[in-house]
Amino acid sequence: MRVGTVVRGILLGLGAFAFLFPFYYMVIGSLQREPDQTVAGAFPHPANLTFANYATINDRVNLLGSMANSGIFAGAVIVGTVVFGALAGYALAILAWRGRGAVFALALLVQVVPFQLLMVPLYVMIARNYGLADNYLGIILPFVINSTAVIIFRQYFLQLPRAIFEAARIDGASEWQVLTRVALPLIRPALVTVVLITFIGPWNEFLWPFLVTKRADMQPLAVSLANYISNVANSTANPFGALLAGAVVLAAPVVVLFIAFQRYFVASDLSTGVKE
Amino acid sequence: MTSAVAPAATTGTRPVSEHQRHRRRQGVLGWLFSAPYLVYVAVIFAYPLGFAIYMSLYDYFFTAPGVNVVRPFLGVRNYTRALTDPAVQRAFLNVGEFLLINVPLTVVLSLVLATLLNQVVHARAFLRVSYYLPYLTASVAVVGVWLFLFSGSGLVNQLLGPLAPNPSWLVNERLAMPSIALFVTWKQLGFYILLYLAALQNVGKELYEAAATDGATWWQSFWNVTVPGVRSATVLVLLLSTIVGANLFTEPYLLTGGGGPNGASASPVLVMYQQGIEQGKPGYAAAIGVLLVAFTLIIAWLQNRFGSERG
């Protein structure tokens, strides 16, 4: 049994190393004055440390502007999801109405519709027919309500005792008041979960904003960094340093949020969309 | 939506019981509260889905907004062209190669790591966080590190020394697709580990105890208790990793510089992007998309059939 424990520890440790090392290496690489890809280069050398790469990438892609675009994109999706997703989740969990089973099935179905099939018609509709290329609305629209969030909201509302709703209604509260004054305050943890997972999607999203933004000042950070990787990197003295500095800036908010709020990332929530 | 609720709302004049009125109000509010979401699903999913199929039957060239032109109807010609296009065939074979590496590796590694993780007490939270981190981080950011690690003079080749492949990983026609498959396995594994971890909570403790009293080794109880116990999760992992693989775009676009070398790592979605948007043939791209979804559904159906049967 002791041997088993040791082997288990070694395997799990190896796994953790394989998952974490690239993140460590991202930070180290972003701080190197001269790119040092030798084994010794994986350890920090005081003589080779610099923040210059962050200045370089900022010259090339305007980090603050791109982050603001990512923030607007993610923020709008969070607002849309929290407002309309909570409404739909409440209707699915608490209200008795014909069609609610069908709507719930729809919310599950939507999650398995592959984006690659929608990509071309959505591009034609949004960028060509409605002229929303290089427009925040065009970037946001396809993501504005996160279906996983609808299902998480429903799940949490279902867990609340029915008696609370009956009592509030008998006291003369309208359904809107029951939702905003009674139900929502009771599911605050779900709200945190929804905000976190909804934030990550648009913040990391590359394909869609890449398709609909050509102007550099409209691009979210993931898109401008990708353009730097595929076009501009060769014209920089230390291309890897600048690239990794950009990668650190793109990854940091999500990593920090995840570590700070990790108890809100529950596996059952993340897989509810497909599990039922 | 309003037409569906109107009759219920206007018949309130008849004397009805408090209970009935309450139910009717809920019926109206149910549709009302779901209306924004339903509109969203209709505009962003249902309509484009139909539009994709419609478009795939036409030579759907781009025009200025508002201009009305007649686009030639092609019938299935976009489909026959796609099926005989060497670039498309190559892309489908590439994604097949990707799936053959990525899917088994994902299932085995995530189940083994989840099982081990389920048995430890110490450092569980730390391990969970570290396994999950790549899944949550933007592909664009982690692609950057992989480019650094797997470049010609990168750390991986430095460690391999004389064993380093030449040409290097991402510019090697034979290794480009396996490298991408490895990257995606690494990036997605945390999600599947958590999925298995949740499934493992439902495997009866008494089964393990029974196995232990029968003198089963770790391997025997893993193979005879754990593996059958999480079968439904395995079918889900197969399904999801296949869908993720079929959706492959960012990695061949960035990691191997647009599906290089020589199209060796081009994916169907990358070809769709090149044909539909760069070259202005959205009808042709939509046909490739429909074919891709059809192939994905066939694979998913086979997985579901054989995954659930053997039990």
Image: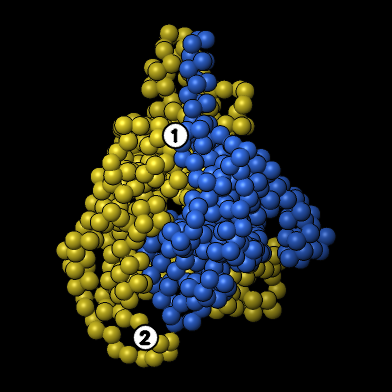
Chain colours: A blue, B yellow
Q: Which of label 2 and label 1 is nearer to you?
A: 2
Q: Residue furthest right?
A: A171
Q: Residue furthest front?
A: A47
Q: Position of residue B262 (x, y in %)?
A: 25, 56
Q: Nearer the viewer, residue B118 or B214?
A: B118
The amino acid pointed to by label 1 is Ser
Q: Nearer the viewer, residue B186 or B19?
A: B186
Task: Count the labels in the image.
Answer: 2
In this rendering, position of residue A168 left or right of residue B9:
right
Alpha carbon distance from label 2 to label 1: 48 Å
Mark 2, secondary structure of its residue: loop
Q: Position of residue B146 (x, y in %)?
A: 44, 45
In this rendering, position of residue B187 left or right of residue B33:
left
- At horizontal 51% and vertical 15% (from top left) the residue drawn is A6
- Work out whether B20 lies above or below A53: below
Give residue A56's quadrant in the image: bottom right
For label 1, the residue is B110
How would you rate the neighbour count of disc 2 (Cα within 10 Å): few for under 14, some for 14-19, many for 20 or more?
few
Q: Position of residue B21 (x, y in %)?
A: 69, 68
- Work out whether A7 lies above or below A250: above
Q: Nearer the viewer, residue B180 or B57?
A: B180
In this rendering, position of residue B258 left or right of residue A122:
left
Q: Position of residue B102 (x, y in %)?
A: 35, 41
Q: Earlier in the sequence, mark 2 or mark 1?
A: 2
Instruction: Identify the disc placed on residue B8.
Output: none
For label 2, the residue is B63
Mark 1, secondary structure of its residue: helix
Which chain contains the residue that carries disc 2? B
